[in-house]
Image (cartoon, rainbow, N blue to C red):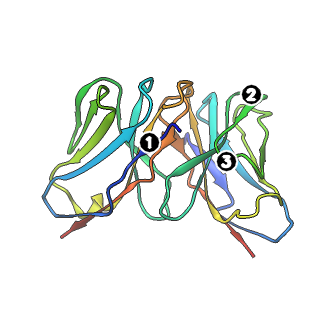
Amino acid sequence: QKEVEQNSGPLSVPEGAIASLNCTYSDRVSQSFFWYRQYSGKSPELIMSIYSNGDKEDGRFTAQLNKASQYVSLLIRDSQPSDSATYLCAADIYGNNRLAFGKGNQVVVIP
Amino acid sequence: DGGITQSPKYLFRKEGQNVTLSCEQNLNHDAMYWYRQDPGQGLRLIYYSQIVNDFQKGDIAEGYSVSREKKESFPLTVTSAQKNPTAFYLCASSPRTGEKLFFGSGTQLSVL
């Protein structure tokens, strides 16, 4: 079954540290990858999109894509308490440009 | 302001009742989606529509129905056949399928 997996449990990081999140996907045809941030009780908001192998940086966020190994990661540098949220990975794994989401990783930044 | 409006924010369903969740967008997006989110879980796709008057089932369509009579509107009906409807329902849109999604604020549906 085609899927997007985020297997890590809740991640606690001290303020100012780097938070690292990983996501694997099952289908090599995937071309588009996204990271969404979701605060409790709120809707997801897009923080990063990546389409090519390599790194993409946007402020304190860096997305890394490795299509050969079928994983995409998100690094949050200089973590702030406001980064405490659930981070959802999404990919177009079905080949018809329909996104599938992972279950999410909760990040807790400790002041 | 452009965006996606979902209503109501909270909805309660009695057993055997059908309820309809509203989703309206003024972003002129072609594609619209309905997702369901259970506590501690990711988003699961219920239905999606790429153009007016056309829609496709997602992964968990049983017990739900949709219509797409207008580009800006994509209402979701939770029918009595959906035996476990309690969840957070999210509507989203994108310029085309596969592009980044813009989400509404969600509807929390609970069973009385």
Host chain of mark 1: A
Q: Which residue is mark 3?
A: B60
Residue B82 on image: x %, y %: 77, 58
- Say few, some or many: other residues with alpha carbon within 10 Å of mark 3 (under 14 / 14 to 19 / 20 or more): few
Which amino acid, mark 3? Ile
Label 1's element? strand
Residue positioned 31% across, 37% down in the render: A72
**Tag 2 or tag 3, which sits nearer the N-term?**
2
Q: Which residue is mark 2?
A: B52
Q: Is residue B106 left or right of residue A4?
A: right
Q: Is residue B36 left or right of residue A12?
A: right
Q: Nearer the viewer, residue A1 or A81?
A: A1
- Say few, some or many: other residues with alpha carbon within 10 Å of mark 1 (under 14 / 14 to 19 / 20 or more): many
Q: Which residue is mark 1?
A: A4
Q: Are marks 3 and 2 on the same chain?
A: yes
Which amino acid, mark 2? Val
The tally of labels here is 3
Which image quarter holds the C terminus of chain B?
Answer: bottom right
